[in-house]
Amino acid sequence: MTLTALLRRTAPAELVTLRHALHRRPELSGEERETAAYIVAELKRHRPDEILTDLGTHGVAAVYDSGAAGPTVLFRCELDALPITEISNFGWRSEIDGKGHLCGHDGHMAILCGLAMQLAKNRPAHGKVVLLFQPAEETGVGAADVIADPRFERISPDFAFALHNLPGLPLGAVGVRAGPFNFASEGLAVRLSGRTAHAAQPEAGLSPAAVMGRLMDALPALPESLGHAPGESLVTLSHARLGEAAFGIAPGEADIWVTIRAIDDEMQAQLMGEAEKLVHRLAEAGGLGVALDRHEGFAAGHNHQEAVASIEAAASALGAGRVDVGDPYRWSEDFGRFGSVAKAALFVLGSGEDHPRLHNPDFDFPDELIGPGVAMFEHIARDLCGEQKGG
């Protein structure tokens, strides 16, 4: 079988219409009330045994319970969009200025609704299938909030699966690997405080410029200085500001933002800790005040071998093209949190080699992937929970 075998799995027109409707009304992380309500209305058409709402803020979970013993298998997608202005001319482009579904979460939601359609036709024979529409993936807090919700214990999955479309790969190609799959990451915001002065008398103040310069060199060099192997971790300078935009003022304040990434949570914790120590040491040596804030923490994604085996079996049975995932991806995904509560695995589904990249203002989820995504998820669900014909 070839790549086109999976791509021949076309989606019903109503799923494409659904995706376009979601695309028009994007909501940012933590604001997904309208999106969640739209999803609940859609799910009710497909007769789950239970719908949980407001999980970890705006999360929604639909439960298909066979009533027989068996595993609980969770499939997750994301509700949130991005604070980016869309520049496409599609008829379904965003109707909200400054917001857009430019990561494909609208398509992921359509895929999970397609799985609900299939489960309504043929319910699981044993165990439970849970469809989770997670809030706030883009900020790294949604999965933790959902897991911390006391009602999540009623789901308590044995397995958890998710997919993410990925431009740069052939359309419909599946990529997966056991073990480390994508990096942990967290933002570190540094505020250095000295004292302003007149630009004609800078010695009367305390400028953070010299310490700022040292940190801008030393922070990105941390992985190498700690002896991390190439490709295992990364510190990226993402923002810097010194003083005010005025010629008459010698600066008294500086901001440096870095994004810190590592292949696993242990290395991430070490790197974050060493970065904070470095900042404090250099600031103290320069006589500066310092404030540190952490932002948007993502756990590393680690794919469980048993879950990967189900993904690989589905890809093989459905005739999916495969791409080799040699090294873990350096981008982060909030799904990594589910690895702490279930045998979890994330896989990528190619959006096309020349497709606009994720978070680009002209990105749009390929509707051709809805059918293949539904087919992959349904095969995994049937593999683990079977089906009751005509349920």
Image (cartoon, rainbow, N blue to C red):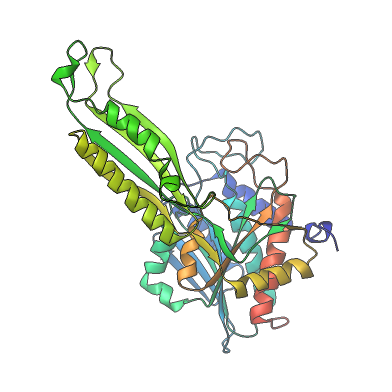
Q: Quadrant of residue 70?
A: bottom right
Q: Position of residue 324 (x, y in %)?
A: 70, 57
**Residue 57 visible at all:** yes
User: Would you say 316 lies left or right of 378 here?
Assistant: right
Depicted 136 relative to depicted 346: above or below: above
Report the label total.
0
**Image point (72%, 46%), residue name:** 352
Image quarter in which the N terminus is found: bottom right
Q: Toward the viewer: 123 or 359?
A: 359
Where is residue 139? Give x, y as percent: 43, 50
Question: Quick check: 389 left or right of 162?
Answer: right
**Residue pictured at 39% horizontal, 60% vertical:** 57
The relative height of residue 172 versus residue 196 in the rendered view (above or below) is below
**Residue extending farthest right:** 1
The percent coordinates of residue 370 (x first, y second) are 69, 56
Residue appearing at x 33%, y 50% in the figure = 274
> As rendered, which of 15 and 204 lies closer to the eye?
204
**28 lies above or below 114:** above
Image quarter of the C terminus:
bottom right
Residue 6 position in % (x across, y down): 78, 61
Q: Quadrant of residue 64?
A: bottom right
Q: Residue at x 21, y 33 (%)?
A: 286
Residue 293 in sight in this render: no
Looking at the picture, does residue 43 appear above or below residue 26? below
**Depth check, front residue: 111 or 376:** 376
